[in-house]
Image (cartoon, coloured by chain):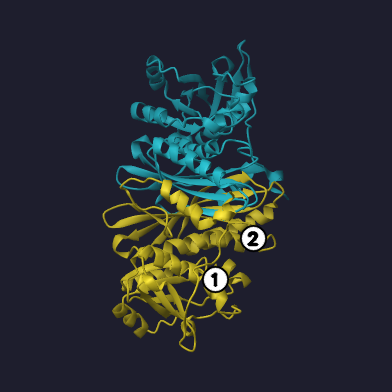
Chain colours: A cyan, B yellow
Amino acid sequence: MLIKDIGEFALIERFRRKIRTDSTVIKASGDDCAVLKFDKKRYQLFTCDMIVEGVDFLPGDKPELIGRKALAISISDIAACGGIPRYCVVSLGMPKNTTVKRVDGILRGMVDLAAKYKLNIVGGDLSRASRLSIDVSMLGIVEKKYLCLRSGAKIGDIIFVSGELGGSIRGKHLCFTPRLKEARFLVENFRVNSMIDLSDGLSQDLGHILEQSKAGAVIYEGLIPLSSQARNLEEALFMGEDFELLFTLASKEAKKLISMRQNIFRPIGEIVDKKYNLRLVDQRGRPRAIRIKGFRHF
Amino acid sequence: MLIKDIGEFALIERFRRKIRTDSTVIKASGDDCAVLKFDKKRYQLFTCDMIVEGVDFLPGDKPELIGRKALAISISDIAACGGIPRYCVVSLGMPKNTTVKRVDGILRGMVDLAAKYKLNIVGGDLSRASRLSIDVSMLGIVEKKYLCLRSGAKIGDIIFVSGELGGSIRGKHLCFTPRLKEARFLVENFRVNSMIDLSDGLSQDLGHILEQSKAGAVIYEGLIPLSSQARNLEEALFMGEDFELLFTLASKEAKKLISMRQNIFRPIGEIVDKKYNLRLVDQRGRPRAIRIKGFRHF
């Protein structure tokens, strides 16, 4: 049996079942970051993301943007947990005949983004590999009271997204701005019940919240903010790499947010009982079940 | 210009020069681990290592041993800084047609070794890749007073290694036991001036200590403990992957260690003025300069 036969999520589940952790681990695997004990008021967040040439970027993409993306996706994970990125290490696998110019560009992209986020690049590892691949591991800090997980959504919560969705593959995936400022605005001013970053498409990532929160959701086609780059709704639902925030607030908190007219945050639906799974209400008010699917590596 | 033209170390130096870190970073890049502020008495250690099929292991190697090695090399890095491994995340790049059996084997190798070292595997990332590659990022803890760096060797220090060197490629590199117990014994009972793990060969790794400590060294051919797997002295000097400890003690401390008859630790030479670089004294007492070289990816 091959991994493509069982799929990425069954594979992750296999890992999850076998891993044992001690009481200093608040949350292992299954969220945007692992959550570790740190001090009285704060947790440490720990996450890793690997990007590979031909999958997450193309050979012709600008090296600066490749380096930038490698860091940005982990910053986005830390933000989605409500935290602040602090340190990272970078493993770089490269073919021998990579040009120094390309490596310098990748490095520049990383260093510039790190400076912008006051993130310390503290180490790394270089390896020979057949194709360029970059793995970034990042540490962040989050105040205990601000920690956001996928598992906290409650029936009646309003579902929000930041920014616009869809069509990221036509450019945004390489130069998106991780929603750190926005996530910190949210946790500092609201009780955020659940949050995730949209890396695999709205349907699949909302699916993660629903699964971990044991809930269902109704979302409204007319409310989903489509990017000008998106060709259709399907791209927002099922294509990945938007790196926007998806989060839920109790209705009172939601009203407060809406009243602030921060138009980057838009309500798209609500959390309902688990038995409804995921439903999409079209522009004429007709509900239909939608499949929880999106980008998968295998 | 290609990276193979300038070589791995010039490339690392390029990284080092461009990276800026804040005052919470005690030591970035250039040692076995990055060293970060943690609490009053302890530092946090942070390291990453990528292993790639065809470079660090072969397609036919036992999956359990591949998974084991991926973790063991980072445990060895934490040990070389005097610390204790605590948490890791694992990024796995795999071709689609990888068998589930192989992945299960890799996972088993990792989980078993983690259990042995009370190490928490807390998360990971799966990616499609053209060849199997595994990147492990590990966090450890070290008491401030026990921290060992490459930079602390002093003229007159005695140089020691643990275990036996050379020929690791013929098996040991896949099933070595990281010298955590030994490193902790050393830091808890001795003032260890400098330490590194032998991953790239004695010459090159001792070279790192000499460079960072601005010192030279004389080592004695007759004192270098050769593994039964080693074909000759050159393998101990210039081949990598022994994953033994290389460390230096002031002569008083060295006498104490030698008197304890822990025959796993053997003196092989001493630290001298920088002007002597690295010298090897052969069995007839004749010194000769040896080149600081060893395994390089590029």
Relative to B67, is A69 above or below? above
The numbered mark at residue B238 is 1
The numbered mark at residue B272 is none
The chain letter for the residue carrying disc 2 is B
Residue A190: percent from the left, percent from the top? Answer: 36, 26
Q: Quadrant of residue B159?
A: bottom left
Q: Nearer the viewer, mark 2 or mark 1?
A: 1
Give me the residue at 33% from left, 66% from top. Answer: B152
Quarter that holds the C terminus of chain A: top right
On whether disc 2 and disc 1 are found on a single subunit, the reply is yes
Q: Quadrant of residue A6?
A: top right
Amino acid type, mark 1: Phe
The foreground one among A268 and A243 is A243
Residue A197: percent from the left, percent from the top? Answer: 50, 33
Relative to B197, is A267 above or below? above
In the picture, measured across the screen, residue B207 lies left or right of residue B157, that is right
Relative to B278, is A144 above or below? above
The numbered mark at residue B63 is 2
Distance between the alpha carbons at the discs numbered 2 and 1: 27 Å
Q: Secondary structure at mark 1?
A: helix
The foreground one among A107 and B162 is A107
Q: Residues within 10 Å of mark 1 (few under 14, many from 20)?
A: some
Q: Quadrant of residue A117?
A: top left
Q: Secondary structure at mark 2?
A: helix
Give me the residue at 42% from left, 49% from top. Answer: B17
Q: Look at the image and tell me whether residue A44 can be seen.
A: yes
Q: Residues within 10 Å of mark 2 (few under 14, many from 20)?
A: many
Amino acid type, mark 2: Pro
In the picture, measured across the screen, residue B66 lies left or right of residue A39, that is right
Give me the residue at 52% from left, 37% from top. Answer: A64
Residue A230: percent from the left, percent from the top? Answer: 61, 21
